[in-house]
Amino acid sequence: MLRKKTNGVAKGSRTGSLLSPLAAKTMDRRGFLTASGVAVGGLAALSLTSTRVEAATPSTGGGEVVRKKSVCTHCAVGCTVEAEVQNGVWTGQEPAWDSPINLGAHCAKGAAVREHAHNDRRLKYPMKMVNGQWQKIPWDQAINEIGDKMVQIREESGPDSVYWLGSAKFSNEQAYLFRKFAAYWGTNNVDHQARICHSTTVAGVANTWGYGAMTNSFNDIHNSKAIFLIGGNPAEAHPVSLLHILKAKEENNAPLIVCDPRFTRTAAHADEYVRLRPGSDVALVWGILWHIFENRWEDKEFIRTRVYGMDEIREEVARWNPAEVERVTGAPGAQLERVARTLANNRPGTIIWCMGGTQHTNGNNNTRAYCILQLALGNMGVAGGGTNIFRGHDNVQGATDLGVLADTLPGYYGLTAGAWAHWARVWDEDLDWLKGRFPSFDKNGKTLAMMNEKGIPVSRWIDGVLEAKENLDQPDNTRAMVLWGHAPNSQTRMLEMKEAMEKLDLLVVVDPFPTVSAVLHDRKEGAYLLPTTTQFETTGSVTASNRSLQWREKIFEPLFDSKVDHEIMKLFADKFGFTDRMFRNIAIEGDEPVIEDITREFNRGMWTIGYTGQSPERLKKHMAYQHHFDRTSLRAVGGPCDGDTYGLPWPSWGTPEMNHPGTANLYDLSLPVSQGGLTFRARFGVERDGVNLLADGVYSKNSEIKDGYPEFTMQMLMDLGWDKDLTAEERASIDAVAGAETNWKTDLSGGIQRVAIKHECAPFGNAKARAVVWNFPDPVPVHREPLYTTRRDLVKDYPTYADKHFWRVPTLYESIQKKDFSKDFPIILTSGRLVEYEGGGDETRSNRWLAELQQDMFIEVNTRDANNLNIRDGKDVWVSGPEGGRIRVKAMVTERVGEGVAFMPFHFGGHLEGKDLRDKYPKGSDPYVLGESTNTIQTYGYDSVTQMQETKATLCSIMPA
């Protein structure tokens, strides 16, 4: 609904408060960018009247203007924000020309972040619901009342009945501390937004070649000769990344191929646009690979030396001839042959994907299929190649790495006894004491140690509340829910979520804004709002999509009565009586844990992914000398950071004293490991059914082992005679862990990693990537029809899974798919992002600059469908889903979506089934723009490995309102 408004102001009850100084002017996107400071080449700092934007005034006249660097708090491109601060007030924003990532540019959201921080719609003090009304209370009362109730629930039902939902908005340090806090509380019922955005990426990619992250970088796309983009719309979701994509397109003449059910703003830049039916990604990729294999365009030597299981992929792909692919996907065979030829003739090429590929019941199959396409083409481990996976929140990569997940401790160590023993050593904690914090549980004659069991993922927290107790694999239902930096309207099944919120004994929201959590339910008591700060009011590190860490400076002191997240965690630790244990190696100033001490603590423990070399000092140095880093390679040229890769992208092996430069491109054999080279990880053993899993005759530059090899242990060093290179201190530390059985992941001295790298070997071994993941439900990726599908003819050929029980909850598949909803709900519904808003939208819809740009929730409907349904452009319609919900939104009649497909953005909230909930917000904190959430009608459906929610392929019906 990107239309100019009649008077430049929003409709509805808050018209007078929205940009009243601009009421006489019309504002479109370009007008906004000019007004808020962005023009071609960066921030122009001009308003609509061509005067400088002065959105805040210092409290006293004069005073030195200080510039401070932070990082944008929206998507994970990692754009530097350069703030002007005078007398403690953030008064202006300048282009961060020195940043090698954003090069002085910002999208609309980045240009408006000052208003996000200095925002009068924020929560200003703790609040408690009393008789259905929000009332102000002091912090000590809030912590005591919440803590007392939690202790009561813990005593009655066990620690698993309190769910700690964390945030991709945490800094790395806060994310680490949050996961540690959950461990000290005694639960694995802890998770964050990565579950519902890229959990299928992490699972699929990590199980293919070892690490579940972006392999290259935005900047490395400059080297790409072809760009294949599927299930992503960076022009709106990651706008600054488009600078790097278009640089390759223009300078390399790299063809851009965009595959999407919707003709997006990104597709408008494409050389080849492929429209596919939602939920048919695997079939599409196999259709492309069919042509590659048929024409012998695959990289045979790469496959022979570095890939396991490609023959089984060939067998599956052989079934996907052009006719069958077109039957399932809608994409013509001739077009896919052209795509395959383009990719084969323009190497290295990169693949980019986002949530359009991940948010499916089949999501893990999609992400593995993308990886296999790159392996077949030999595009891995090379500049310009790789899988460039764009993450959606500013620190969703870091929060995942730091373990804010229901299935692992920091660094992807998992929940095994060995993982807990490792972290107990890092924390100097008594392992038996930690074990005593967790319950055991008898289920079907088997005693489960809940310490070692996956928790309930955030996608299923409502089932932890609503499901019958006897159907859960934990002692009792979820009774208290802490939503810490989370937008509930970003999750499906919102009507059931409302029911779950009302059934809880305790609901706690910790956030700078009240969020939809404050208004969705009809509770009368037992709900609290705790105001935390934005990330501009604190300091710490944040990890961009490309694995680079950047250090934020504090721009100003916390506003109102808000507190930084790590201070709130400390206050709860005080209440629960484990502060002295949890912070024994972390200094506390007042009530605020020292951020740098938290960084150093996770540096001591996260050997698996190389979060050990990025000390606070090194990261701060990189921010100070951003201008020394090459804009394509990200290598520093001279100066104090000489040779480092910007942000020390993980793995940055060993201790900070080793000065490992970070790893720009994963799995690149052309460089020594000491300079950022890498092999595929030997994560899955050395052989499978007698077949070698280690690399065959290839190795990283200067490696002293000229073939594949397993991961390093102390015993392996001894066998090679390299143990003599250890210092006495390193040897003593290794002996204290497990002697000869100590490995590169559990050696707290870093000695095993240091010695392996001294001999230019990768600590994690040198193996083949595996195209076949034998421990997944589908070892070879296959197409499976969505649970809610209009194509009943395909259900028999490509059925979903049998119902099963995993992640503590029963999960339905075939029992849903066997029902035909397509007659009453004939249109496929998908969802996605807008450039103006982010996530659940509470922050951005509360930003007056952004709220002006997009004031109405809408649904895109194809012209033919609209005419058949008597729907007029711009008029209200009712959209209904097969599980009972319905929402009232505006219709946008457009050819962006194909016939039989509709699209809605997921950033809206504050309306529910036609009802405006504005009066339920605490006074003065309601967002300027409210609207229905698409997730009110989005349906049940979860990935077979990670419990990722399905948001990209369900059904709906549409009728005039």
Image (cartoon, rainbow, N blue to C red):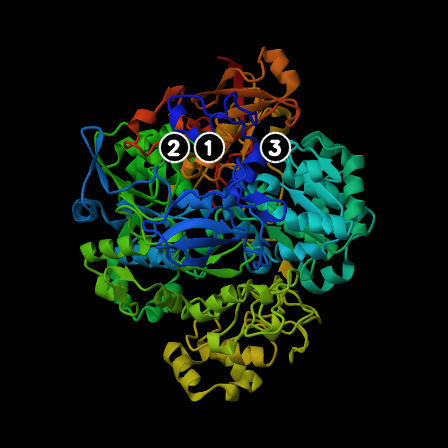
Residue type for callout 3: Pro
Q: Is residue 743 above or below residue 75?
A: below
Q: Residue at x 38, y 55 (%)?
A: 175
Residue type for callout 2: Pro
Residue 43 appears in view: yes
Label 3 Cα crowd, 10 Å radius (few <14 / some 14-19 / many 20+): many
The CA span between labels 3 and 2 is 32 Å
Q: Quadrant of the N terminus?
A: top right
Percent position of residue 636, x then y: 60, 69
Nearest the camera: 526 or 536? 536
Name the residue carrying label 2.
Answer: 927
Q: Secondary structure at mark 3?
A: loop
Residue type for callout 1: Ala
Percent position of residue 755, x then y: 53, 81
Nearest the camera: 648 or 913? 648
Name the residue carrying label 1.
Answer: 851
The CA span between labels 3 and 1 is 30 Å
Label 2 Cα crowd, 10 Å radius (few <14 / some 14-19 / many 20+): many
Name the residue carrying label 3.
Answer: 278
